[in-house]
Every structure is written in structure tokens, then in C-alpha cells.
Amino acid sequence: MKKREIHIVGNWKMNQTLHEISDFFIEMSKMKMELKCKAWIAPQALHIPILKEIAFTTGSIQIGAQNCCEFDSGAFTGEISPLALADIGAEFVIIGHSERRTIYKEDNELLNKKVLAALKHNLKVIYCVGETLAEREADQTFAVLEKQMLVGLKNIPADKAHLLLIAYEPVWAIGTGKTATAEQAEEAHAFIRGKLAVNSESTVILYGGSVKPDNIDSLLSKENIDGALVGGASLKASDFRQLCSSASVVSR
Ligand code: PGA
């Protein structure tokens, strides 16, 4: 059976100036580490070509996007085309982040179109799922996750399923400093793995929500947690590096 590689994915959201990006990579290159995990960064879309160039010279970090449109081209002012992302060499795209779901009202049906559009261009897709605090308290966590999976991932062609990763991000843990316990996360990850129609054992499932160097080890000690999608702590080179070091000693 194919092993699942551990991934640390930095979601930079709408942060980092050119100056800060340059400082980040200068810091990273000073740290000279041997990466045994996959290290990915999703900067603002405008910065993807710049990061691709820097990452090429520093080696081994893959660069992707935080969102894409469900269409390839046309009259969609301000959108990010998946075709253009593939064209500039982006490796992956995050789809369905809770900030897209809540602030921009993206629903499971729309997200499904985006997933299919990205896969068509062979972009790897990190599809995000997760419940709000109210849903957890109402005992709706599994029902919400199931719907997000069923609708968001329908009609994926069998020959593209290997390009899919899932991120479980409980909304109440994002940017709040409240991490799900490793046990809560593992329970959700096992549920999600059980709902995957194909490649269930080989699909990478990341945890996201206030991941930091001091909680990554306990999360990665769980069998179904194959890495992390990291916001705040991915902006600092020293934290990002530490997360990658922790991930480099884990194997599935
Ligand atoms: P956080 O963000 O690590 O800052 O909680 C995670 C995310 O939004 O992907």
C-alpha cells in the first residue's frame, strides 16, 4: 500500500510584503535543514511566481494558491483562473477554506465546481472541511463533515483522485489559539477517511487550526493525521522550520 507522506502547508492568507517574503527565505536558507516531509506554501496569488523563483533556488518547497475560480477564462473580473495557475506552475490549490465559506459565502456546490476545475488542470487540491462551534455543540460535527465531503467531492474522475488532499479545520480552532485536542482531531480524521470513496488509505488528511511548534508533535502522533495546514505559525520562518522538523521524523 502507498505510504502517506507528511505535509506541512503554510497558508499565508492575505499577508506578507515582498520585503517580508525575502526575509522569510533568507531565514529559511540559514537554517539548512534536510526536509523529509513535504513543505508547501500558499502565498497571495500575486506572489506565486516570486515564491516559485525563490523556492526553486532554496529547493524543495512547493508553491500553490489559496483559491481558484470554477471557470478557466472569461468575464469574471478579479477571479483567479485554475488554467492560469497551472500555466504559471502552481502545484496545488486550497479550496473551501472556512474563510471562503463564511466571508465569501462559497457553498459545497460551488466548491465542488472549483475542485473539478482545478483537478482538470492537474493541480493538487487541498479540500477543507470543518464544523463551527455551534455545529459541534449541537452534535452536528459528523453530519456537517459528511455533507461537505459528499457534495464537495462528487464526480471526481477516478484518474484524478490521487491529486486530492483533505484538510480538517474546525472553524472554532482557526486563528483563535484553541486547537482541537489530538483525540478530537483524530476522531474527525478517521471519520473523514471512512467517507472517502476511493484511495481512502492513501489520501493525506491534514489538520488545521492554531497549529504551532508546541502542539504539532501530539497531533502527528495520531495515525490519521498526516500533517498540518498552518496559518499564523507559517508566517515566521523559525516556526515553519520547526513544524517541518517535527514532521520530518514521522512516517506513516
Ligand atoms: P491558523 O490558521 O493556523 O492561524 O489557526 C489555519 C488556517 O486558517 O488554515
Image: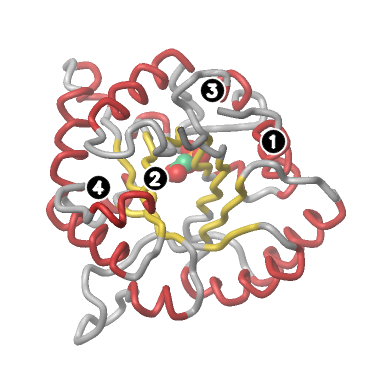
Q: In this rendering, which labeled residue sits more in front, label 3 or label 2?
A: 2
The image quarter containing residue 151 is: top left
Look at the picture and state if 243 lies above or below 12: above
Please tell me which of labels 4 and 2 falls first in the chain: 4
Q: Quadrant of residue 243?
A: top right
User: What amino acid is found at the position of numbered circle 3 in the picture?
Assistant: Leu
Mark 1 → mark 4, Cα distance in angstroms: 33 Å
In-image side of 55 versus 34 (left or right): left
Disc nearer the start of the sequence (3/2): 2
Which residue type carries mark 2?
Leu
Q: Which residue is mark 1?
A: 248
Which badge, 3 or 1, comes first in the chain's sequence? 3
Q: Residue at x 44, y 80 (%)?
A: 87
Q: Nearer the viewer, residue 122 or 230?
A: 122
Q: Is mark 2 within 8 Å of ligand 1?
A: no
| Apparent side of residue 90 relative to residue 112 in the rendered image (left or right) | right
**Cα distance between the residues tagged 3 and 2:** 17 Å
Q: Which mark is residue 219?
A: 3
Q: Earlier in the sequence, mark 1 or mark 2?
A: 2
Label 4, on which residue?
A: 102
Residue that badge 2 annotates: 165
Which label's residue is closer to the chain start, 4 or 3? 4
Mark sitting on residue 2: none
